[in-house]
Structure formats: structure tokens, C-alpha cells
Amino acid sequence: MKNLSKSRPWRTGALVAVVFGLVVLGCSGKPNPKNTIMDFFSALHADDTTLVRQSVDLGRAWRSVSPDLETPGDSLLADIPWDERLLAALTDEGKLRTRWIKTQVVIGKTEMVADSANVEVSFIDRDTRVQFYNKMALVFRNGAWKIVAFSI
């Protein structure tokens, strides 16, 4: 009986190369941006400030909801940075948190281009059944997706 590895060394090398290539391709893929959206809404329901911070780029995302963070006539808010206002709105009894946890959230299709993604998110009022369709924007940085806009 012949030893195939000695008679055809290229086959062993090719097999090793193919297996290595498949392993690298399987490990190099980015996580699904939908997971970040799901983690974010789980964090809202659990009032988990740490997971909210991990899911959202507070420095950029406030721009998409800044009108919701303004309180007319409250001069004290003028001194609070926007990212801190956004975190306050997403935690405890914040405006956005209380509004969003009252709705049914449906996460839809994802569109990815390089290090950017848009994820469809629909909010359905549990009483009226009125649906608000939306897309959230995410960017991939430092090995994780971060929400940079709640509505685009």
C-alpha cells in the first residue's frame, strides 16, 4: 500500500491551505449589527447603563434625537453636554427610554457597506397598533458595532 502523503505532497499542502482559508474566513467576519440593536433594547428594558454605553456612540447619536432632549425654559440643561443628556434620556426615567419600552420593537432588514450598517427598526404602539418605521445607523469600530443615529 502506498503512502499518499509521500506520493502526492501537493494534495496535503492544498488540503491544509483550504482548511486554513476556511477557518480564517469564518473568524474574520464581523458580528451582525442586529445583535447590537437587540442588545441595546435589552439594555433599555433592564435599565443597564453599561450596555447602553457599549451599544451607542453617545457623542454622535445625540444629533439624531436632539429635539427630544431639549426642555424649553430649562436653563440648567444648557450646561449639560449632549452626550450626557442622551444617556440620561436612555436610562432610568428618561424620555426616550420610557417612550421606547412602551412599544413593541420589530427589527428588520440590515444593509451593510464596509464598516457602516443600517438596520430597520419599527416601533409599534401596543394600544393603537400604529407603526413608526425607522432605520438606525451603526459603525464598526474596535471590533464592535455602535449605534451612531437612531433615525436616518
Image (cartoon, rainbow, N blue to C red):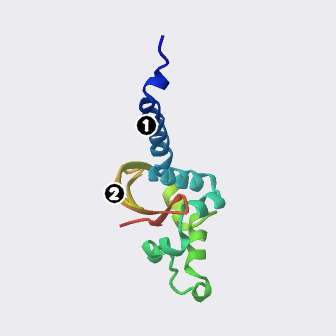
Q: Quadrant of the C terminus?
A: bottom left
Mark number displayed over residue 84: none
Q: Is mark 1 on a helix, strand or loop?
A: helix
- Is 46 left or right of 26, judged from the image as shown? right
Question: Disc count in the image?
Answer: 2
Q: In this view, does 54 lie above or below 4?
A: below
Mark number displayed over residue 133: 2
Disc 2/disc 1 C-alpha distance (Å):
44 Å
Please report the residue visible at 47 percent of the width from the left and 73 percent of the height from the top: 68
Q: What amino acid is found at the position of numbered circle 2 in the picture?
A: Tyr
Q: In this view, does 22 lie above or below 62?
A: above
Alpha-carbon neighbours of circle 2 within 10 Å: few (<14), some, or many (≥20)? Answer: few
* Chain-order first, disc 2 or disc 1: 1
Q: Which one is nearer the viewer's eye here, 80 or 72?
A: 80
Please report the residue visible at 45 percent of the width from the left and 42 percent of the height from the top: 21
Of all residues shown, which one is farthest toward the top? Answer: 1
For disc 1, the marked residue is 18
